[in-house]
Image (tube, rainbow, N blue to C red):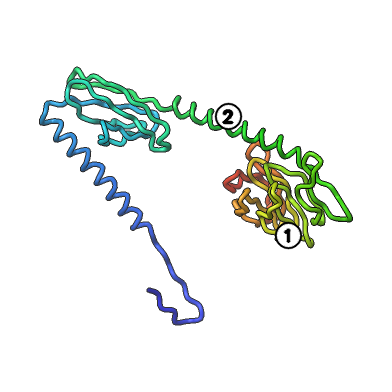
Amino acid sequence: VFTVKDDCEFLQVSLTKIREARLAKQEEERRAKEEKQNTFDAKIGAAEVHIETDIACRIMRFKEELITAVPDDDNLIHLKKGTHKLTFVSIENEQDNYSQVYIVKDECEFLQVSLTKIRDTRLAKEEEEAEAERKRIAEDDARYLKFEKDGKYGFKKDGVVVIPFKYDYAWSFSEGLAEVELDGKHGYIDKAGKEVIPFKYDIAWGFIDGLARVKLNRKYGFIDRGGKEVIPIKYDDAWDFQNGKARVRLDGMRGYIDKQGNFTPDK
């Protein structure tokens, strides 16, 4: 509760202690769970199993989590001698997982867990599917052609008018959306003619890899296909993305930004 008394006041906010307390509690709970498991297994003559993993993962036995294993650490669990079915689930993405039947024979054993190939296979498949979808959309984009009638622009598909001639100007479809101009402002429409991104920009460009460059009040930034401003409209100048980077100019400095807006100045 903050009481404002003067015309100008300063308020300092600190969440560091709250965050550290949460992390400490989580670590305490993890250690308590591990200690409980180890104590229980020790009573039944369990062996030490040291686990090396390339990706942080949860190690499950049936529906019970034994431990969260992390790379470059001695991840220790205790298992009774005999046969166990273990499941390894990536912390980063639960789709990256596999199960293995493991036989404990000795008092001390070592188990190597590798999820890298599973992750890379998933990513390659996702990229292949995304590329196929991009190709499909691009092929469909090419079927929508802009036309002018009585000074207004619209679109035809396969020779049939599908978007009325009502815009002051229009540009080709890219990634399923077309930039159009109306009453001096630029926005975007979809293939049904629905205005999906408001007419508020001074200038706008087509979408490339999910982002479009826009200009507003003499500043440049980038929006996504939902119209969200993902890179602030603050740059004095900006160019389209190529290979994951876009050249920009800000306060006299020139350099590049990535798709998260991280700036790297020219050397």
Q: CA distance from mark 2 to mark 1?
A: 38 Å
The answer to whether residue 78 is left or right of residue 207 is left
In terms of sequence position, does the residue under pointer 2 or pointer 1 come before the other?
Answer: 2
- Residue at label 2? 128
Q: Position of residue 18 (x, y in %)?
A: 34, 57
> Is the residue under label 1 in contact with that under label 2 (CB below 8 Å)?
no
Q: Comparing marks 2 and 1, which lies closer to the viewer? A: 2
Image spot of residue 204 (x, y percent): 73, 52
Vertical placement of 13 versus 103: above or below? below
Which residue was labeled with disc 1? 218
Give the number of callouts.
2
Horizontally, residue 93 falls left or right of residue 215, namely left
Seen from this angle, which residue lies furthest right? Answer: 150
What's the amino acid at mark 2? Glu
For badge 1, the amino acid type reads: Arg
Is 24 on the left or on the right of 241, as rendered? left
Residue drawn at point x = 40 percent, y = 27 percent: 115
